[in-house]
Image (spheres, helix red, strand yellow):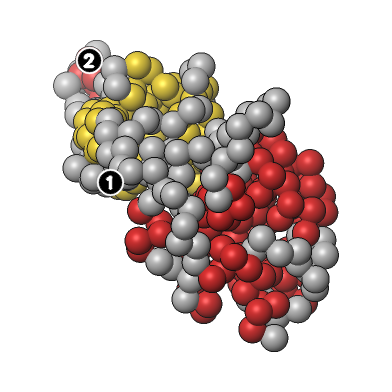
Amino acid sequence: MPDWGTMPWGFGPWGGAPAVPEPVNPPYIIDRVPAPNSTEVNEEAPIFVRFYDIDLNLNPASVQLTINGVLAFSGGVFTSGYVGVYSFTAGVYLVRIFKIGGWGYDSTVTVTGYAEDTTFFPLSVTDTWSWRTRSNPICYSGLTPLAIETAIQSPLVTFLDIEPARRLFLDNALIVDPLRTRAIPNQGNKAARVLYQIGFETEISTVLNTYRLRNAAALKTVVCERNNLLLIDAALMKTHEQLKTGIQSLFSLGALPETYISGFLEYLDSTIPTYRVSIVANMILLAKSKELSV
């Protein structure tokens, strides 16, 4: 009679042979923007979080973001009050999330990220970090416009496909009394300051470096009459298809390097309003800067 310990059954778990070991590396978070303990963060800044599992077995359905104690994203679904995008490529799970209406001035934002792997006994990561938005400073009076802010109040004469967006941006940059009974002092300069600041609120603004437009003092001012970003976005997207043509004209007329074209198009088609509005501001600033340099 054969020995049960030497037959095939003896090599299974019941026979005492070792099982295939489970991976020992839990997922982890490789990137957080805004960074932990950041201060003076823009009150409308999006949050970026990237998860990674070195064993390439991250469970995408497990990924969650909790913001100020409220679940904001879970398994590919954004909860009410939040919008964004997510992707899962080469083992990296990226979440970009934006709070409708922004975070408010002088506020602490606390984020908790969570993810599991797909092992039988899931390994997980939980991490919590915080950052603060900027304080509410004195409102910008509109008395000290930059040269580029003065310039963008005049029509574009070369980049005609971008001109409708320039007008719409400035017309919708500020909260205006619907009955037009109360004028905003220095309205044109304030609207131009909004456009200028939004142009520098995402990383695509590096394309503006050639024109040396970045001004730290101007970027720190607060336009108290600034309109809701979603309303500005809704106005600008009326020219969405024309703006795609405008991107090509920026390249063909020498204002935009070819390496930026795909990035501009991606931002214009983004599901996050911050990126759509920012790319339009960059297009206007680029177009006007190019016209001034000719």
Local packing at callout 2 (Cα closer than 10 Å; few below 14, some 14-19, many 20+) is few
Earlier sequence position, callout 2 versus callout 1: 2
> Between 169 and 43, which is closer to the camera in this rendering?
169
> Between 269 and 180, which is closer to the camera in this rendering?
180
Q: Is residue 213 left or right of residue 273?
A: left
> Between 207 and 171, which is closer to the camera in this rendering?
171
Q: Is residue 105 left or right of residue 227?
A: left
**Residue 16 % position (x, y):** 17, 21
Q: Quadrant of residue 280?
A: bottom right
Q: Nearer the viewer, mark 2 or mark 1?
A: 1
**In this view, 293 is above or below 99:** below
**In this view, 159 is above or below 4:** below
Residue depicted at 60% across the width and 43% down the height: 173
Residue depicted at 76% across the width and 78% down the height: 253
**Residue 249 % position (x, y):** 78, 70
Q: Label 1 belongs to which residue?
A: 40
Q: Quadrant of the C terminus?
A: bottom right
**Residue 48 % position (x, y):** 40, 42
Name the residue furthest left. 16
**Residue 167 % position (x, y):** 74, 52
User: As shown in the figure, which amino acid type bears the numbered disc 2?
Assistant: Trp
Give the secondary structure at mark 2.
helix
User: As shown in the figure, which amino acid type bears the numbered disc 1?
Assistant: Glu
Q: Is residue 78 visible to us here?
A: yes
Q: Quadrant of residue 95?
A: top left
